[in-house]
Image (spheres, grey):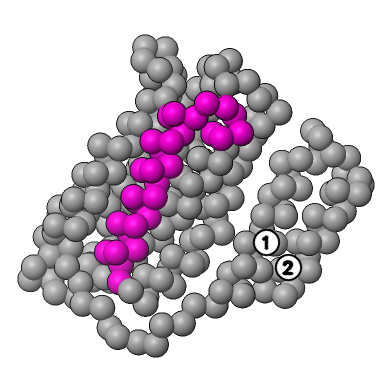
Amino acid sequence: MNNKQTHRPFVLIALILSMFMAAVEGTIVATAMPNIVADLGGFSLYSWVFSSFLLMQAVTTMIYGKLADLYGRKPVFITGVVIFLIGSLLCGMAPTMGTLVIFRLIQGLGAGAIHPIVTTIVGDLYTVEERAKIQGYLSSVWGISSVIGPLLGGIIVQYIDWAWIFWMNIPIGVIGIYGVSRYFHERVDKEAKSIDYLGASLFFISISALIIVFVQTGSHWEWLSTNTLIFVGIFIIGFIAF
């Protein structure tokens, strides 16, 4: 790490903005969903607008962490934010509820990189004594986003258009990308490039099966239905194999 060239306050601001952008997406959609359903229909996919984002974010987090160790924090972080912004742009243009769910998967794919890499960059930039204070700043982002998200979503839907709950991420993300690319400098240690693709695939399959059970059972499937038992079995077998 070359701290002489890295401007920590600017990098920290960029990281906090990026984390807020990804964190608020989990809550801001809630108050906009009635308007989204009214425009796009597809009420049966209501819960998947939330679940698809969280699912993809959860299953990709560990993969991005490994990629950051191999190729560096900066390129993985910027790639994640770019994917997230592409997903945000597409979400605001979604013509149907089905496509919105797909675009939320893309958003989640990008969000999976933001949270772990932000924490890792902070660990690289700050000493052990400084990290407690900085982690307090990052933790407060989650609390603030959970409070502001529904309120902000309601205001946007009331006075603008629901698409802007996604499009507002674009300027925030651009600032985050600029701050990290311009002011964060790192030295990547060369090591053998190795990723456990099989393990990542098994983890993805097992957690996806579990999420499907939680989303579908009780509303569309019975708890002891064939579909439920099949996906529970996939989760158990996949997780043991992982």
Q: Which three-letter amino acid code belongs to the residue tagged 2?
A: Gly
x and y, in percent, of residue 225 in the image? 91, 45
Q: Is residue 165 left or right of residue 47?
A: left
Query: 94 or 80: which is nearer to us?
Result: 94
x and y, in percent, of residue 233 in the image? 83, 61
Q: Is residue 185 above or below residue 175?
A: below
State the SS at label 1: helix
At horizontal 34% and vertical 57% (from top left) the residue drawn is 79
Which residue is situated farthest in the left direction here?
4
- Other-residue count near label 2 (Cα within 10 Å), few / some / many at <14 / 14–19 / ≥20: some
Magenta stretch: residue 223 in it? no
Which residue is situated farthest in the front direction here?
95
Q: Main secondary structure of the magenta part?
A: helix
x and y, in percent, of residue 69 in the image? 37, 75
Q: Which three-letter amino acid code belongs to the residue tagged 1?
A: Ile
**Quadrant, the C terminus:** bottom right
- Disc 1 target residue: 205
At horizontal 74% and vertical 73% (from top left) the residue drawn is 240
Tell me whether circle 2 and circle 1 mark residues in contact (CB < 8 Å).
yes
- Other-residue count near label 1 (Cα within 10 Å), few / some / many at <14 / 14–19 / ≥20: some
Q: Quadrant of residue 237?
A: bottom right
- Disc 2 target residue: 238
Q: Is residue 182 left or right of residue 153?
A: left
At horizontal 87% and vertical 44% (from top left) the residue drawn is 223
Q: Which residues are magenta?
A: 72-100
x and y, in percent, of residue 106 in the image? 48, 47
